[in-house]
């Protein structure tokens, strides 16, 4: 009799161009999220934040689906009291379940979600926490929580308003309807529809990698910090975020390369 070693719930690799690949790894279960998936995903993105060489992240699900949401065993194997403690017990901004999405937003490099097949519930909220979402024609989206008598609470109240109108967000949440990729693109849930979303994601990641890593990180910080917050907050944020860029090494590299029409050789990300 041989021992079976469980496959890791999340896989992380970094290629030769310093593009990280994070993969939810339960293809036989349409990448449904177990309790262990949450700390594994949070750790993956937290570890990437510490690596200043990483330029972009391609985020996908193994097999035919991105993520079908919470595995029902999470509810059946845990008491309501235990689930409630995980929901409420936190000394940080995000709780146990919100942590992966919050780490995604804190990561100062762009995250490109590659969406195929099921993208439901918690899976959709993971995709929404990415900076870009590229889907193929098999993708299907649903804010599934309403069908279970609950609301989406994995940062969707933060990410959905950045992408869609309030009435659209309320309709998606209140109905739990299944949305095909063409409508998802029309509504703003996804960035692009492509037959090969993995190739498109890599193309975008490589294009962004040609820019200053400090400018890219600053752009993510700026727009996540001021979206829909009005002129005063926006203009102040522009000044405060721009100042260290102007004093940084990568600004000088970028301007010199632009003037000389050469390929820039950037230093690693400053933060």
Image (cartoon, helix red, strand yellow):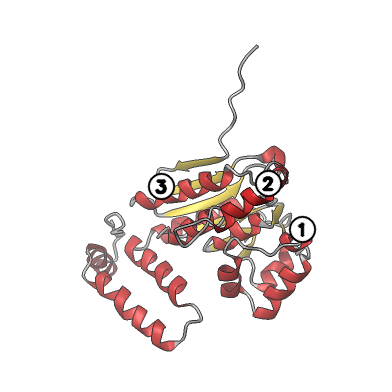
Q: CA distance from mark 3 to mark 1?
A: 33 Å
The residue nearer to you, when weighing 9 against 77, is 77
What is the quadrant of the C terminus in the image? bottom left
Position of 92 with respect to 246 (left or right) is right
In x, y percent, where is residue 176?
76, 65
Position of 106 with respect to 214 (left or right) is right
Chain-order first, disc 3 or disc 2: 3
Element type at marker 3? helix
Nearer the observer, disc 3 or disc 1? 1
Chain-order first, disc 2 or disc 1: 2
Q: CA distance from mark 3 to mark 2?
A: 31 Å
In x, y percent, where is residue 116?
68, 52
- Tell me whether the residue at label 3 lies in contact with that at label 1, contact meaning CB atoms closer than 8 angstroms: no
Q: Residue at x 26, y 75 (%)?
A: 243
Residue 239 visible? The answer is: yes
- Disc 2 crowd rating (10 Å Cα; few below 14, some 14-19, many 20+) is few
What is the quadrant of the N terminus in the image? top right
In x, y percent, where is residue 226?
44, 77
Which residue in the structure is indicated by mark 3?
47
The residue nearer to you, when weighing 96 against 57, is 96
| Among the 4 quarters of the image, the one containing residue 78 | top right
Which residue in the structure is indicated by mark 1?
148
Chain-order first, disc 3 or disc 1: 3
Which residue in the structure is indicated by mark 2?
79
Residue 204 visible? The answer is: no
In x, y percent, where is residue 39?
52, 46
Q: CA distance from mark 2 to mark 1?
A: 16 Å
Q: Residue at x 55, y 70 (%)?
A: 158
Q: Residue at x 71, y 69 (%)?
A: 173
Q: Residue at x 46, y 46 (%)?
A: 43
Tag count:
3
Q: In the rendered view, would you say 119 is above or below 26?
A: below
């Amino acid at each position: 009799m041989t021992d079976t070693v469980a496959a890791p719930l999340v896989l992380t690799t970094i290629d030769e161009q310093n593009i990280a690949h994070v993969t939810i790894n339960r293809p036989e279960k349409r990448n449904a999220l177990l309790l262990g998936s949450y700390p594994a995903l949070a750790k993956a993105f937290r570890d990437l934040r510490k690596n200043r060489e990483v330029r972009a992240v391609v985020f996908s699900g193994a097999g035919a689906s991105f993520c079908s949401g919470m595995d029902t065993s999470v509810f059946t194997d845990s008491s309501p009291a235990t689930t409630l403690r995980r929901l409420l017990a936190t000394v940080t901004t995000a709780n146990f379940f919100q942590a992966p999405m919050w780490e995604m937003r804190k990561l100062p490099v762009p995250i490109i979600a590659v969406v195929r097949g099921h993208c439901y519930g918690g899976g959709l909220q993971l995709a929404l926490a990415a900076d870009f979402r590229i889907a193929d024609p098999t993708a299907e989206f649903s804010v599934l929580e309403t069908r279970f008598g609950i609301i989406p609470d994995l940062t969707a109240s933060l990410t959905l308003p950045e992408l869609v109108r309030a009435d659209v967000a309320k309709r998606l949440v209140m109905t739990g309807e299944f949305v095909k990729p063409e409508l998802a693109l029309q509504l703003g849930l996804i960035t692009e529809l492509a037959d090969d979303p993995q190739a498109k994601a890599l193309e975008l990641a490589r294009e962004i990698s040609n820019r200053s890593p400090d400018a890219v990180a600053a752009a993510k910080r700026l727009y996540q910090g001021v979206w829909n917050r009005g002129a005063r907050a926006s203009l102040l944020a522009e000044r405060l975020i721009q100042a260290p860029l102007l004093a940084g090494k990568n600004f000088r590299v970028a301007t010199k390369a632009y003037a000389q029409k050469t390929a820039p050789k950037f230093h690693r990300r400053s933060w």
